Image (cartoon, rainbow, N blue to C red):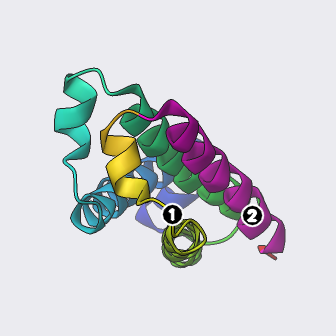
Amino acid sequence: MWSNFWEYPLVETAARFSVVILCAIVFLAIFELVTKYNNWQQIRKGNFSVAMATGGKIFGIANIFRFSIEHNDSLLESIGWGTFGFLLLLTGYFIFEFLTPSFRIDDEIEADNRAVGFISMVISVGLSFVVGATIL
């Protein structure tokens, strides 16, 4: 009975769901460490730019896991692709900061500059599709 436990679709779905949620929490905590503002405090205040940037990261993480699951990777492979994809999303964020030397991305997002928040969201979403397309 226990040898086939992980092969039941409901168990596998619950396991993958749990792993993605746990990874998303860890990755968002890391993202919180590298931004100068407090994401959840700003969202609570109604900062739509922070909500868009954070939502883009959540979508990006989930989308990378979607591609990994779709390609029938194991849980460990899914965690690996999710971690790799998150690092690439984070790198994309730093590249965005580097390519805009006339202003600081964190300052603009914290000030609720919705144009910058939207671009940050689109970068995360777009890069997640690029990363996902490379998952074999």
Residue at 58% x, 75% y: name it: 88
Numbered mark located on residue 92 in the image: none
- Find out whether the residues at labels 2 and 1 contact each other: C-beta distance under 8 Å: no
Q: Which residue is mark 2?
A: 132
> Of the residues shown, which amino acid type is indicated by label 2?
Gly
Residue 129 inside the magenta-drawn segment? yes
Q: Which numbered mark, 2 or 1, is in the foreground of this view?
A: 1
**Quadrant of the image containing the N terminus:** bottom left
Residue at 68% x, 64% y: name it: 68
Which residues lie in the magenta part? 113-134
Disc with the residue nearer the chain's start (2 vs 1): 1
Q: CA distance from mark 2 to mark 1?
A: 32 Å
Residue 12 makes an appearance in the image? no
Q: Residue furthest front?
A: 102
Could you tell me which secondary element the residue under label 1 belongs to?
Answer: loop
- Please provide percent x and percent y for residue 58: 48, 46
Which of the two residues, 28 or 98, is positioned nearer the viewer here?
98
**Is the magenta region chiefly helix, strand or loop?**
helix
* On screen, residue 61 above or below 136: above
**Quadrant of the image containing the C terminus:** bottom right
Q: Which residue is mark 1?
A: 102
> Of the residues shown, which amino acid type is indicated by label 1?
Ser
Could you tell me which secondary element the residue under label 2 belongs to?
Answer: helix
Residue 110 inside the magenta-drawn segment? no
Residue at 66% x, 45% y: name it: 122
